[in-house]
Image (cartoon, helix red, strand yellow):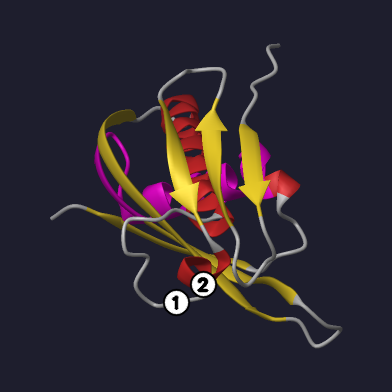
Amino acid sequence: MPTRTARTAWNGTLENGSGQVELTSSGLGTYEMSFPRRAADDAAGVTSPEELIAAAHSACFAMQLSAVIAEAGGTPIALDVKADVSLGPDPAGGFHLTGIALTVEGEVEGLDADGFAEAAAAAKAGCPVSKALTGVEITLDASLAS
């Protein structure tokens, strides 16, 4: 299996510095980041490790869920997945991820709401990014489109 690479260049202190994270393997772009924007409610056009983790988790979960749905005899038509990754103070000092909330709405043929919920739970457990983030509480809200 392939290895993917990202690169970060950082200048300055945590409080006053800034950096750029580059999606090296894909060459899709370089994105600005800073700790003040990371800790603010408004990202103001600047990314953060939490946003990148959210992107990775939502993408991984969507792929895993499409596979699990097919294994269960269903056909995934459309999956809309959102991952909210929260950062907060760590009682031991510094910061840590305080939680990840996965939300998925699916348009699926061949599975009812219970079958979809079971598939979503299995996908959450089987997604490689979920497995990598076992130290963080991950919640799941799964629903079929009406």
Residue drawn at x 30%, y 58% as measured from the top left: 143
Q: Is residue 130 left or right of residue 19?
A: right
Q: In this view, does 145 lie to the left or right of 60?
A: left
Q: Mark 1 points at which residue?
A: 40
Residue 62 sits above or below residue 81 on the image: above
Residue 40 sits above or below residue 76 on the image: below
The CA span between labels 2 and 1 is 6 Å
Residue 137 sits above or below residue 144 on the image: below
Q: Mark 2 points at which residue?
A: 36
Q: Do the residues labelled 2 and 1 touch (CB within 8 Å)?
A: yes
Q: Count residues near mark 1 (Cα–Cα under 10 Å), then give few for <14, some for 14-19, many for 20+.
A: few
Q: Where is residue 133 in the image (x, y as percent from the top left)?
A: 71, 53
Amino acid carrying label 2: it is Pro
Q: Count residues near mark 2 (Cα–Cα under 10 Å), then give few for <14, some for 14-19, many for 20+.
A: some
Residue drawn at x 46%, y 68% as measured from the top left: 37
- Is residue 111 within the magenta segment? yes
Circle 2 SS class: helix
Circle 1 SS class: loop
| Camera-nearest residue between 107 and 98 | 98
